[in-house]
Image (cartoon, rainbow, N blue to C red):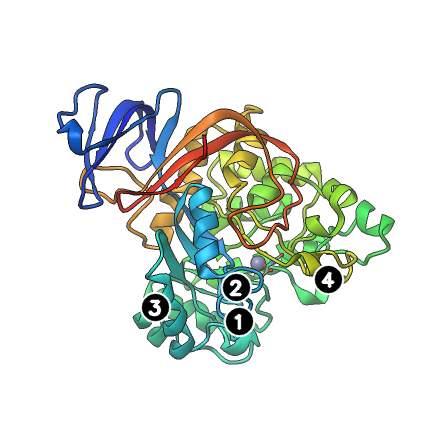
């Protein structure tokens, strides 16, 4: 058993924000949440963690990670990916399906899914919307859902064909699963990874204009208007897209949004400083966009903070910016980046950040997690919201493609507990 004493327990699902003790039983579930000093238990069989001055929250839930398994395991695999997640405070993650082969058949799904069941945290798997992510033929969504897929996505590649997407939305509605979309209209792109504007001009790149994102998002919101599927707009990067979601929600259209820690923390200026490491699809944009994303999380327009943890090898990222692949790792820096750049600057309350990291993604993806309650899952994170630390140059992840290496961040995960077991503990 684990007894977590004297922590500030924040649970967005119940609205709890009080100093409490939390007991997790040997069955891996929460046995008690009580006023400090009130829990009666046999101290001989209990591991006690002093959480004074710390926050105790549900283990984080990330609905957007790339563990590169199968086929691209020189970048990451399910074991190292899960270790990176645990180190970041995550107890549940959803893997994207742009692997090699991509997850477009039950056969491929089952192989990776079996290995994902053996890990210390809950690693869930999404499947493709279209065969080989080619955008021409739908996968057998019903069979993939039956096999265990928690959602459908061609993340990495936008879906151009409206009729096909409409059919996919209808099937996802029928199956009651989220469909998550990467919104960058290929017809409006000059080159991916760097915002179209000042920085792309300086670097002599074409650039990725914000229109590419908001035009495709507008199309897909309208395609979903009559269907009502759980439409999840991934890694929103533009102020205009945030406003689109705000208006769509006002009209009662079913749509949800993700934002990444990097889009909340940084702008295109980071590309000047860190080059290829800051190349990501969709790109980091302007301070105006960043502020709009923050306001979107603060007012609930953006439901979820999801990392888009995208590992690549050092050799790949050492290429010049027009040839290096897009993406950055994110699991181990997520909390620090978000707290440093939104909470400690007074822009988003802690409770709202925790909501976007826990219960909102859990509810959308129908995951039993993201909340703290007696008999609920013993999935808990303990973090120090004020602790200063420097982002190191190596990680639990197999990869180290972070443009934040060397940055000082405020807020650090100290323990991650999954199913009642300590799966990560910060070295003292
Ligand atoms: O920058 C990105 N990298 N964006 C994506 O959507 C995919 C990801 C990857 O798989 O590397
Ligand atoms: Zn994507």
- Regarding residue 253, the answer to whether it shows in the image is no
Closer to the camera in the image, 185 or 144? 144
Where's residue 415, x and y in %? 38, 36
Which badge, 1 or 4, is on the more N-terminal residue? 1
Mark seen at residue 71: 1
Q: Residues within 10 Å of mark 4 (few under 14, many from 20)?
A: some
**Secondary structure of residue under mark 2:** loop
Give the residue at mark 2. 68
Which quarter of the picture shows residue 282? bottom right
Q: Residues within 10 Å of mark 1 (few under 14, many from 20)?
A: some
Mark seen at residue 114: 3
**Secondary structure of residue under mark 1:** loop
Q: Is residue 260 above or below residue 148?
A: above
Q: CA distance from mark 3 to mark 1?
A: 16 Å
Q: Are marks 1 and 2 in contact (CB under 8 Å)?
A: yes
Give the residue at mark 4. 189
Q: Are marks 1 and 4 in contact (CB under 8 Å)?
A: no
Q: Residues within 10 Å of mark 2 (few under 14, many from 20)?
A: many
């Amino acid at each position: 058993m684990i007894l977590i004493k004297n922590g500030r327990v924040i649970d967005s699902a119940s609205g709890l924000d009080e100093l409490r003790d939390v007991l997790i039983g040997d069955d891996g579930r929460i046995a008690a949440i009580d006023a400090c000093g009130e829990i009666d238990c046999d101290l001989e069989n209990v591991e006690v963690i002093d959480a004074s001055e710390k926050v105790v929250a549900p283990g984080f839930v990330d609905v957007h990670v790339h563990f590169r398994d199968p086929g691209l395991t020189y970048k990451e695999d399910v074991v190292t990916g899960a270790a990176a997640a645990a180190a970041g405070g995550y107890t549940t993650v959803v893997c994207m399906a742009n692997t090699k082969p991509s997850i477009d058949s039950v056969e491929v799904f089952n192989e990776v899914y079996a290995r994902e069941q053996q890990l210390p945290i809950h690693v869930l798997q999404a499947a493709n919307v279209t065969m080989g992510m080619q955008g021409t033929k739908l996968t057998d969504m019903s069979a993939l859902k039956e096999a265990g897929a928690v959602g459908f996505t061609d993340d990495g590649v936008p879906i151009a064909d409206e009729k096909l997407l409409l059919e996919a939305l209808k099937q996802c509605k029928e199956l009651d699963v989220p469909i998550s979309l990467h919104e960058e209209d290929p017809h409006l792109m000059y080159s991916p990874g760097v915002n179209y504007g000042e920085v792309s001009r300086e670097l002599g790149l074409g650039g990725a204009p914000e229109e590419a994102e908001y035009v495709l998002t507008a199309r897909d919101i309208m395609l979903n208007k009559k269907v009502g599927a759980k439409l999840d707009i991934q890694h929103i990067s533009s102020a205009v897209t945030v406003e689109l979601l705000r208006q769509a929600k006002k009209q009662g259209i079913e749509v949800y949004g993700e934002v990444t820690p990097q889009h909340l923390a940084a702008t295109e200026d980071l590309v000047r400083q860190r080059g290829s490491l800051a190349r990501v699809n969709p790109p980091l944009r302007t301070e105006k966009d960043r502020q709009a994303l923050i306001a979107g999380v603060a007012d609930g327009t953006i439901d979820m903070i999801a990392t888009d943890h995208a590992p690549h090898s050092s050799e790949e990222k050492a290429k010049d910016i027009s040839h290096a692949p897009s993406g950055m790792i994110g699991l181990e820096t997520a909390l620090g980046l978000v707290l440093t750049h939104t909470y400690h600057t007074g822009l988003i309350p802690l409770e709202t950040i925790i909501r976007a990291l826990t219960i909102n993604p859990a509810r959308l993806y129908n995951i039993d997690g993201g909340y703290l309650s007696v008999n609920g899952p013993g999935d808990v994170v303990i973090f120090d919201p004020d602790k200063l630390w420097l982002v190191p140059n190596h990680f639990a992840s197999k990869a180290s493609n972070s443009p934040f290496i060397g940055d000082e961040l405020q807020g650090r995960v100290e323990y991650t507990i999954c199913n009642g077991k300590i799966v990560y503990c910060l070295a003292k």
